Amino acid sequence: MERAGWLFVLPLALVLATGYVWPLFQAGVNSFHLNTPEGIDLGHWTDANYAKLLDPLYQSILERTLRISLIVSAITAVLAYPVAFFIVRLKPKVQPWLILVYVSPWLVNTVVKSFGWSLLLRSNGVINTTLQHLGLIDAPLHLMLNETGVIIALVPGHFMFVLLPLWAAASGLDPNLKWAAGTLGAPPWQIFLRVTLPLTLPSLIAGLVINFTMNMTAFAAPAILGGVRARTVSFLAFQVNLEQLNWPLGGAIAVGLLVFTLAVVWSGQRLAFLAVRSGRTRP
Amino acid sequence: MMRAFNAAMIVVMLAPIVLVVWISFTPEAFFRVPLDSFSLRWYREALSYPDFVDAFVLSAKLAALAALMATALSFFAAYGLVRYRLAGRGFLLGFFTSPLVVPAVVFGIAMLQFVNRIGLYNDLIGLLIAHVVVVTPYAIRTLHATLQAVPEEMEWAAMVLGATRLRMLGRVTVPLAARGIVTAFLFCFLLSFSEVTMTIFMTGPALQTLPVRIYNYLTDRIDPTVAAVSSLVVLVSLCLVFLANLVGAFKRLPR
């Protein structure tokens, strides 16, 4: 009986083993060899590619990527709270429609979205021409081909990863708790800090983890709106793999990014777990 | 005040998409809103540009094949996981959904090096396998949940009456799980159709999907043709979301 069960599972397992595990493994193996004009030197093992990742140039690109990702996650967290609590107070029938609006940027292809942002943010784009027309600025603002452009495009692009879990947490919140805190004389900011925040913290962390890793590995938005002056890790990976054709080094970047992502996800889960526990034992 | 804030947020969410569609109707050769008049000039331009037409056909074909394969494979795998007490069920389910955690950039690099090594560079098969892997987690999650809700008694009844397991699957389980199967297919299609990061990394010049073609066009020059093509992409996505809504795919939104 069990053997028949394996027959059902096997086809997918085989496809994933050849088309998913093997390629990742192969890139990992490549990353430990040297790139030569004749191809990858599979005869000798080396950690030179990983040593090269510590190069100051690559470190500065990594720092920029981390900075952009953290800023985007922070802005998203601050903006998602009021939106989530606004949506929860609406009629249950309206809520899914509004959620769909916030999910829609994710359903639209990132290249198309980034192109739309470039039309808005360019020096002769909609925002700059409007502001100049209104006489608010004399010279166009530099809104893209720098970190600002990448941040502006990523916030709405990955917003739903934080909004959805917060919305779920907010709709499960007992309104009596806030009411009780209020009757005991707590001002709104204290209710938020002592009641709402601790109770929604696990969901916030879970959402932020996905948001952050998506920011770290986004490609189209940094490529189109950041350009060469605001290169991120994924743009660097593109240049190394497809322009320099240095696959061992490209493989090392891939392995580094994967390990980093897994570490963030793992520590995020740990943190959310601790937040749940401390939320329960709080007096 | 909350209402105004929410309205502003919605504008930020939708502004780039609305702007692309709006500007695609310009009769002029540059980007300027508001438009003086509407024209389909750039749609004609886009449809007479073979690169875009070919890419559109390729994307649609690829999305259909990948969605079909992922849904079929995931249906059987989910059935095996739900109905049999396999050793390591939890591990297998985790394995099948794990491509979700691997960043598209990382998987794209791995696929680029892999298809070159096994001689599938510029080959639809390589691209298809990659897309199946990327969309499988969504299919397996949807179908696992769907099959858990299909009562096993119905299957027993069919088998007691003499149906073979395969016949029973086709006559009982598939019809009962139809909504989940269609939902999985539509989501996989949508995701494959708009997948761009992984595809940009692994695909060769001979096999450019529509989003990749748009990206390459953008790095080269900018005219409203891109806006017209992009609007068509948005239209396809909208139609798929609408279809998914019709079959009730959003009734199980996380709450």
Image (cartoon, coloured by chain):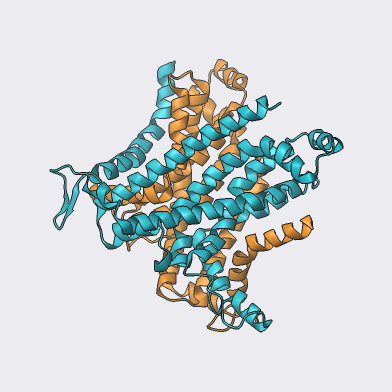
Q: Can residue B120 be seen in this view?
A: no
Q: Can residue B137 be seen in this view?
A: yes
Which quarter shows the N terminus of chain A?
Answer: top left
Above or below, A138 against A120 in this view is: below
Q: Nearer the viewer, residue A188 or B207?
A: A188
Residue A107 percent coordinates (x, y)? 57, 54
Residue at position x 29%, y 47% in the image:
A252
Residue A195 percent coordinates (x, y)? 73, 36
On the rendered structure, is B246 left or right of B114? right
Residue B239 percent coordinates (x, y)? 61, 56
Q: Which of A96 and B9 is in front in this view?
A: B9
Residue at position x 37%, y 58% in the image:
A60
State which quadrant residue B134 falls in: top left
Q: Which of A58 and B205 is in front in this view?
A: A58
Q: How many badges with numbers are in the image? A: 0
Give me the chain that's orange: B
Residue B89 percent coordinates (x, y)? 46, 23
Which quarter shows the C terminus of chain A?
Answer: top right
Q: Residue furthest right?
A: A183
State which quadrant residue B58 falls in: bottom left
Q: Nearer the viewer, residue B216 or A222?
A: A222
Give me the chain that's cyan: A
On the rendered structure, is A79 left or right of B1? left
Residue at position x 34%, y 38% in the image:
A21
